[in-house]
Amino acid sequence: MLIVDDNRNNRLVLKLQMQRWGMLARETASPGEALRWIERGDPFDAILVDYQMPGMNGAELARRVRETRGARAPVMLLLSSVGQPLSAEDQAAFFAVLWKPLKLAQLRERLLEALGRPAAEGAQGPEEPGDSTPLRILIAEDNPINQNVAVRLLEKLGHSADIAANGQEALTRLEERPYDVVLMDVQMPRMDGLEASREICARWPAGQRPRIIAMTAEAMEGDRQKCLAAGMEDYLVKPVTLDALRGALEKSHPVDREPEDTEDTESGTLDGEVLAQLREDLGGPAPVEQIVGLFLEKTPPILAELRDAVTRGDLDAVRRSAHTIKGTSATLGARALSEKCKRLEEQARTGEVADAAASLTEIEHAWGAAEAALRAEIGRQPVPIEPGPAG
């Protein structure tokens, strides 16, 4: 697989996902470099290319590839933003056009279709459940080792998870976003699992609250009855095994949620749903933390370029910088920042930049809020434990 996109964050997300699917992926920011690889005969089965890139857009690259390889050209798929004008000729150059924000499940389906393979034959990560529905899971556990073990087990079963270090923190997380399952340790500081479970049952009615599964080091019948009486619906004895966890989750299902109000696309600094979906698609919090770290590192220099371009009145540079930040911030759920960059990009494209300085100020304020929210978000995620050397 060859990935061609001038946005480094997007390339990293896609490459990580391709590798998780068992594919060999190479990526580049340069359409020219991609073309050189094709011309020298490097073997690719498929190319995923962004439409809007400096120097050569995705449609131009596709035409050059077909001129070079003819009938032996790799399958081409295009990534494009909704609302981006595409001619019929441009679209005809590709097997499929995928619209941003990209759904990875849709990408996988179109890739398999393009390569002539039924979905059942597609590469999966190790030990993923064939047809089980991914669940949104909260782990309420104060022990970092147990937290990481639980996260790894859930990843093997195809689920992602967030962490709460005690019952009070679990309640806070549940107020912030809905979960389908809570894996609840019984003994925790500040608020134990029994008290937290009773509080969950009091705050959320049946059918709208997560299924609570107790995790305890005790296996006595009396303790089990206490857990059930507190509102827990299942009971796992530590150390929790993969088979036991699988059995408990097979009884769980996604919670029915009230439809979300999506009219205001700028409500909230950070869309937790986007990050949760990204963790689920990439197999856990570690790859997302890596991507967020890259975003936090690379965005300030681009903002500086944007500020300089606005000062100089360089519309092309304004459009390019705004476009870059727009895409990466949307990938990570920073909707307000993405929307403000989108407006400035459109202003630069049409030449209506009388209020560019004011737009830049709004972008900088939105960046400050997004940066703080993302740092707080990754700070809540567990630190993965790397396996030690064999021996």
Image: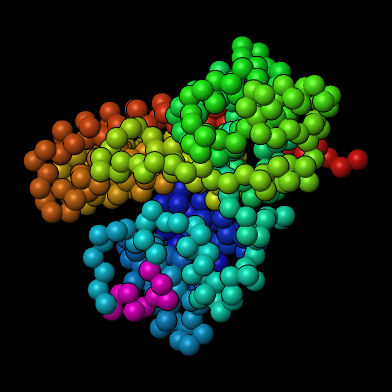
> Residue 54: image x %, image y %?
32, 59
- Give the magenta part as a residue range: 89-97
Residue pushed farthest top?
190
Residue for point 34% across, 79% down: 92
Does the stretch in magenta take in 96?
A: yes
> Residue 14: image x %, image y %?
51, 56
Left or right of 286: which side holds 27?
left
Does the stretch in magenta take in 4?
A: no
Check the image and report above or below for 377 versus 81.
above
> Residue 161: image x %, image y %?
59, 38
Name the one closer to the observer, 213 or 130. Answer: 213
Examine the rendering and report whether any part of residue 288 can be seen: no
Residue pushed farthest right?
391
Examine the rendering and report whether any part of residue 248 can be seen: yes
Q: Quadrant of the N terminus?
A: bottom right
Left or right of 306: which side holds 95?
right
Residue for point 51% across, 22% down: 202
